[in-house]
């Protein structure tokens, strides 16, 4: 009886806190909302970062946003458009108020490092993010996109 009461309490508490989904591995249910393809593509990059680097989703999103803002400052409008169109949603990753709160314009290596530090990561994590982002963009957008991002981020490597 006590086990049943504790189980019911834990299930209701965890489901209210949103933690039940993470424990159960985000098993889909009939109430699961459909995710737009754009969100799914960019979420794949964020999942790659969290899985391979052990960072939180917030760190993955904010770090990617910082790197992409830097890349945007290092490329022509046309090249950046080619890059972001090859991976739908890439330009919107982390564009929430969180990144805006970290800094204004991220157009230098020191600004990227500062953004990473504000996210609770060591600046050395920038070099760990870059190959994951580059590989993901190359896989989604082909060699032209991979070349653009590699060139844009070369000063950070």
Image (spheres, grey):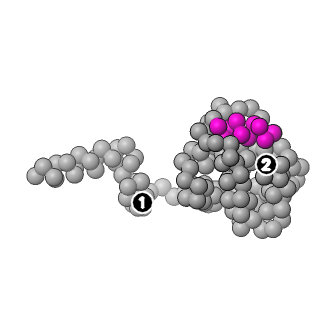
- Magenta segment includes 111: yes
Residue at 26% in and 48% down: 10
- Residue 156's tag is 2
Percent of width and height locating residue 15: 34, 48
Please rate how many residues cluster around mark 1, counting C-alpha atoms within 10 Å: few if below 14, some from 14 to 19, many from 20: few
Question: Is 27 included in the stretch rendered in magenta?
Answer: no
Query: Does residue 58 appear left or right of residue 155 in this picture?
Result: left
- Residue 73 placement: quadrant: top right
Tell me, yes or no, whether the two marked residues, 1 and 2, touch with CB atoms within 8 Å: no
Looking at the picture, does residue 111 appear above or below residue 126?
Answer: above
How many other residues sit within 10 Å of disc 2, few (<14), some (14-19) or many (≥20)?
some
Furthest residue toward left: 1
Q: Secondary structure at mark 1?
A: loop
Q: CA distance from mark 1 to mark 2?
A: 35 Å
Magenta-drawn segment: 108-117
Please determine whether, in this image, residue 140 is positioned above or below residue 156: below
Q: Position of residue 49 (x, y in %)?
A: 61, 55
Residue 95 lies in what quarter of the image? top right
Which image quadrant is residue 70 in? top right
Q: Nearer the viewer, residue 76 or 48?
A: 48
Mark 1 or mark 2, whichever is nearer to me: 2
Taking the image as shown, residue 81 lies to the left or right of residue 57, namely right
- Out of 11 and 114, give the one closest to the viewer: 114
| Residue matched to label 1 | 25
């Amino acid at each position: 009886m006590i086990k049943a009461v504790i189980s019911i309490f834990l299930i209701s508490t965890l489901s209210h806190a949103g933690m039940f989904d993470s424990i159960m591995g985000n098993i889909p249910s009939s109430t699961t909302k459909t995710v737009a393809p754009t969100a799914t593509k960019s979420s794949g990059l964020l999942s790659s970062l969290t899985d391979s680097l052990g960072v939180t989703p917030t760190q993955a999103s904010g770090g990617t946003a910082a790197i992409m803002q830097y890349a945007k400052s290092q490329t022509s409008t046309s090249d950046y458009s080619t890059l972001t169109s090859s991976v739908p949603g890439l330009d919107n990753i982390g564009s929430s108020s969180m990144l805006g709160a970290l800094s204004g314009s991220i157009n230098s290596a020191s600004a990227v490092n500062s953004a990473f530090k504000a996210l609770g990561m060591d600046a050395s994590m920038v070099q760990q993010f870059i190959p994951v982002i580059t590989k993901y963009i190359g896989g989604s957008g082909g060699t032209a996109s991979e070349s653009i991002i590699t060139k844009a981020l070369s000063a950070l490597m």
